[in-house]
Image (tube, rainbow, N blue to C red):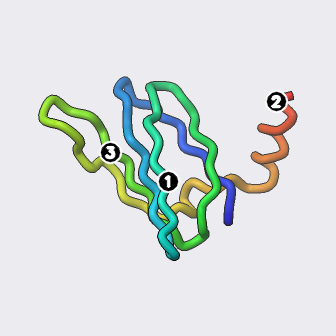
Amino acid sequence: MIECVYRNDTDRMVIVKCVGDDRFYREKVVLPTEMFWFEAPEQARLEIWKMSVSGQMLHVRADVSEYAMNQDEAATETVWAC
């Protein structure tokens, strides 16, 4: 499992879906400017769905590793959170 973070820099709420092996699944509504920290298997895929007038629309599909936090970021965020 790796630690990841997604920040919603849009002006709309999005739905983040993370799908991995062995029935791993995580889904979260992320509001504008909100950050979402999560753990996921290294080979998992991330989908970011934007809300539109007609419903959900796939905006981004990527490897979860693209959202992985490196050790320096993790240490900074931990200190910041205290």
Work out which quarter of the rendered image holds the N terminus and state it: bottom right
Choose the circle earlier in sequence order: 2 or 3.
3
What is the number of the mark on residue 80?
2
Choose the circle earlier in sequence order: 1 or 3.
1
At x 52% / y 75%, what residue is drawn? 22
Classify 10 Å Cα crowding around label 1: few (below 14), some (14-19), many (20 and above).
Answer: some
Dot 3: what SS?
strand
Q: From mark 1 to mark 3, how far is it between C-alphas?
A: 13 Å
Q: Which circle, 2 or 3, is nearer the viewer?
A: 3
Residue 67, relative to residue 82: is it above or below? below
Dot 1: what SS?
strand
Residue 41 appears at what percent x and percent y? 60, 68
Whether tag 2 and tag 3 are in contact, CB under 8 A, the answer is no
Q: From mark 2 to mark 1, how far is it between C-alphas?
A: 26 Å
The residue labelled by disc 1 is: 26
Work out which quarter of the rendered image holds the C terminus and state it: top right
Residue 40, relative to residue 57: is it above or below? below
What is the number of the mark on residue 49?
3
Residue 58 appears at what percent x and percent y? 27, 50
> What's the residue type where badge 3 is placed?
Trp
Residue 6 appears at what percent x and percent y? 54, 43
Q: Which circle, 2 or 1, is nearer the viewer?
A: 1
